[in-house]
Image (cartoon, helix red, strand yellow):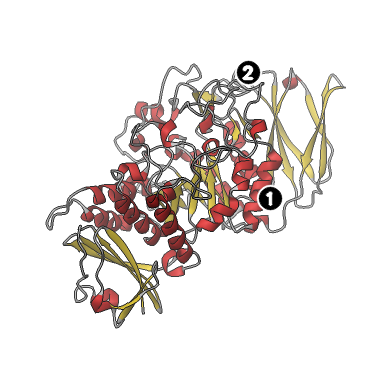
Amino acid sequence: MKDPFLQILVHGEGIGETTPVIKYPGVKVLKVHKADSRNYLFIDLSVSAGAKPGNIKISFTKKGKQVYAHDYPLKQRVTGAASRKGFDASDVIYLITPDRFVNGDPTNDVVASMRENQIDRSGPGMRHGGDIRGIIQSLDYIRSMGFTAIWPQPMVENDMAAYSYHGYAITDHYKVDPRYGTMEEYKELATKAREKGIKLIYDGVVNHIGTGYWWMKDLPYKDWLNYPDGKLRTNHRRTVNQDAYAAKSDKDLMTGGWFDGHMADMNAGNKYVANYLIQNSIWWVETLGLGGIRQDTYCYSDKQFLSNWSCRIMKEYPQFNIVGEEWSLNPLIVGYWQQGARNRDGYTGCLKSVMDFPTQHALVQALKENDGQYTSTGLVRLYESLANDFGYADPLHLMMFGDNHDMDRLYTQLGKDDALTKMAFTYLMTVRGIPQVYYGTEILMDNSQAPNDHGIIRSDFPGGWKGDAVSAFTGQGLTDVQKEMQQYVRKLLSWRKGNEVISKGKTLHFAPMDGMYVYFRSLPGKTVMVVMNKNESEKSPDLERLAEGIGTKQSAKDVISGEVRNLRDLKIPGKTTAVYELL
């Protein structure tokens, strides 16, 4: 690694009262730290570039006698690991809730030793049995749809008594949850995905852990957790990170309060906690050959730690990518975290990507609201949201999405209007940024029967279980509207793949008029025109007004139908987002 420093956490009965002895060529013991608990030691090592792979034998002695011994593996890095490329705007990311996607191995549905050791597909908050094997079996479907990256929600151990399926209450950062499969299966997923041109994104959580974590009854340090008694919850006042007037007590409660009663808050201000979390992230990148990290609840952790964490990873992998979740509708707040931001308080970090919640909100409002020529409602919201790009360091690295696992399905948000849903989807695939699609959007999955119910939002993917009457994989039982949407997604993503005018092109947009919003994506020699027509009836774009984008082009090719038309003859159907390559 570029940084030779390695800190090992050692846990064992009375281990803190021993002296570790290491003799291994190229590995040097820098310092040994005792913790508050007698059952922990932290060993600082320097691993030189000349160190060979093998087992580092650690002897723990007390009064000159060995009382423990352990072999710590020093592994060979994969060739080219440091130049690993992360996801970018050329990708389309498929977000998966593993427990609700495909049950590929029913034998791991129930693990008797786990606190939650039953499945019940009828229970929205229960485990349903989806697993790693199911994702592996679905890679051909994912590829055929045009997705080039997958982001499964966390699949590490969540040994909690209830609601363990969502993955965000981790109880061991280094173990795969056995109800999802094994570490070897996780590696197999990464390898087979990579072979099919699909990057694997790891869903990380550095802010909190599950209260069932193995160290909870014996913490290494008294300040290992924030508010260890769990009585104080975060105030969720995320603006304290930027607010020049924020009270210290509000800042402390925001970053130190527990995210939930069963999610203990990690104190990343403790340098040993920070090292543990940083090294774990790097370990997963190396172990799985990751194509990126999505970091949950990004703004809830200590700011300086987040800077150190992101920069440490990007130092090792300069072409990698990390996206952070900052659920704010204010682009000033979201953009604050992105690498290259010129913040007045001097804060810097190495987070390449941030999730564009402001545009997600604007997109839904733009399609639901009535348009007015001199108002800020309807499509003007979308136009003005894009105009806020001046506040971002790198708009091309914003993650675009219509929904995710924490909000109503896009189809639900848009009133089960398939035309509006298709309009929204087309926008997300043609505007700047990195699009992310939640599993099932391609078949109009819906939770209108239970708005805001996370368990229903994360419903089972049709056809993922043996005996399902409806299957998104074969089309069996899907409605004609669902099939049409699925085919539309497949065509649009196929066109988008490898199309640099979309992933790298410049944007030019025109203020919405008469229920129409037009924007262009262009590179030298290639121009794409996107026309959003929210009207019920067909309309023709005002070519004279759009001359700046059209230039000398005379005809246009519809990227979905392949039909070529003279620009003067263009008629955009009502409630449609049309995409044309100008010829």
Element at label 1: loop
Crowd around label 2: few <14 · some 14–19 · many ≥20 (10 Å):
some
Crowd around label 1: few <14 · some 14–19 · many ≥20 (10 Å):
some
Circle 1 is placed at which residue position? Answer: 1
- Tell me what residue is drawn at x 24 percent, y 47 percent: 368
Relative to 428, say whether 504 is above or below.
below
Q: Amino acid at mark 2?
A: Asp
Side (left or right) of 364 relative to 61: left
The residue closer to the viewer here, 522 or 40, is: 522
- Return the mark for residue 218: 2
Q: How many marks?
A: 2
Q: Quadrant of residue 134?
A: top right
- Tell me what residue is drawn at x 63 percent, y 31 percent: 179
Q: Amino acid at mark 1?
A: Met
Location of residue 208 in the rendering, given as x and y in whole percent from the top left corner: 51, 30
Quick check: can you spot residue 214? yes
